[in-house]
Amino acid sequence: MKNIILVVTRLLVLASPLLLNDVYLPLVPKDATKLNLVLDVLVYIGWQSTLLYVAYQAGWFSWSSLCINLKHAGQWLWGIILFVCVFFAYTGITIALLYAKTHYGISVESFWYFPLPKWNGACVFLYVLYLSVTAGIYEEIIYRGIAIHQLRTLTSNTCILVLSSTLLFVAIHWSMGPGTWIEAGLWGALWAYLYIKTHSLLPIMIAHFLYDVASIYGLHEAIAHSIGL
């Protein structure tokens, strides 16, 4: 029991920036992009980086345990292939959800706090790149890499590892609605399972980054709308 409490406490400490992030984000006006960006740098980059440093110094994880091999070209390619598969899978889900909304009035709400600003194309791309790169790095290191490394001190059961890390990943999106919970649950579970089975985090980081770029630009919805939904 003592070990369970210790691991849960560590995971909650690491998740605290994003758990609290969703408290203030709904209060920020949607057109206050610069304010949102400043707060994101302070919380997402500053706070999370500090916690990662503290966790590393405390021995909660080692960089080698994360299995991030930047020099392995095959892992970059695997990440791109994984993204393509996930992108088309969620495009299918998006089409199904929009069909249900259009024809049956069934709606699964989702909230996003970082709409595309009305800047020139290059600045918008850099904005999207920032949001996507930071998510791909920090969220995979914390909610897959470190979380599963910590959970492995309690169990080696793959189902429990996947479920536990996925629930934590869904929890940090708590204010973003059931649509986002489903999305985070699906891909959180997939990322966790693949990380456990392949012992490689880099492809998942790449797929996560590319997926977020596509999502922020609304490519799933654009494809659905192009067929009349």
Image (spheres, rainbow, N blue to C red):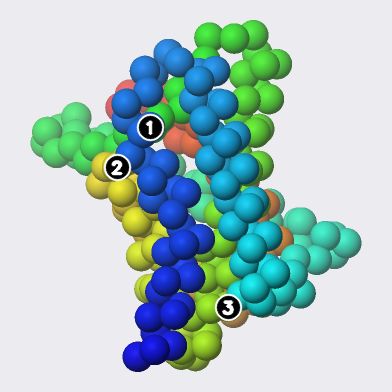
Residue drawn 58% across and 78% down?
149
Residue drawn 54% across and 34% down?
40
Q: Which residue is mark 2?
A: 175
Percent across and percent down for residue 48 are: 58, 51
- Crowd rating for badge 3 (residues with CA inside 10 Å; few <14, some 14–19, many 20+): some
Q: Quadrant of residue 31?
A: top left
Residue drawn 54% across and 18% down?
34
Determine whether the residue tagged by mark 3 lies in a helix, strand or loop.
helix
The answer to whether residue 81 is seen in the rendering is no
Mark 2 vs mark 3: which is more N-terminal? 3
Q: Please, what is the three-letter code of the amino acid marked with disc 3?
A: His
Location of the N terminus by quadrant is bottom left
Locate residue 75 relative to residue 26 in the image: left or right.
Answer: right
Q: Which residue is mark 1?
A: 25
Is 150 drawn above or below residue 46 in the view shown?
below
Q: Please, what is the three-letter code of the amino acid marked with disc 1?
A: Leu
Percent across and percent down for residue 83 are: 60, 51
* Tag of residue 84: none
Q: Please, what is the three-letter code of the amino acid marked with disc 2?
A: Ser
Mark 3 vs mark 1: which is more N-terminal? 1
Instruction: Find out whether the residues at labels 2 and 1 contact each other: C-beta distance under 8 Å.
Output: yes
Instruction: Find out whether the residues at labels 3 and 1 contact each other: C-beta distance under 8 Å.
Output: no
Locate residue 108 relative to residue 80 in the image: left or right.
Answer: left
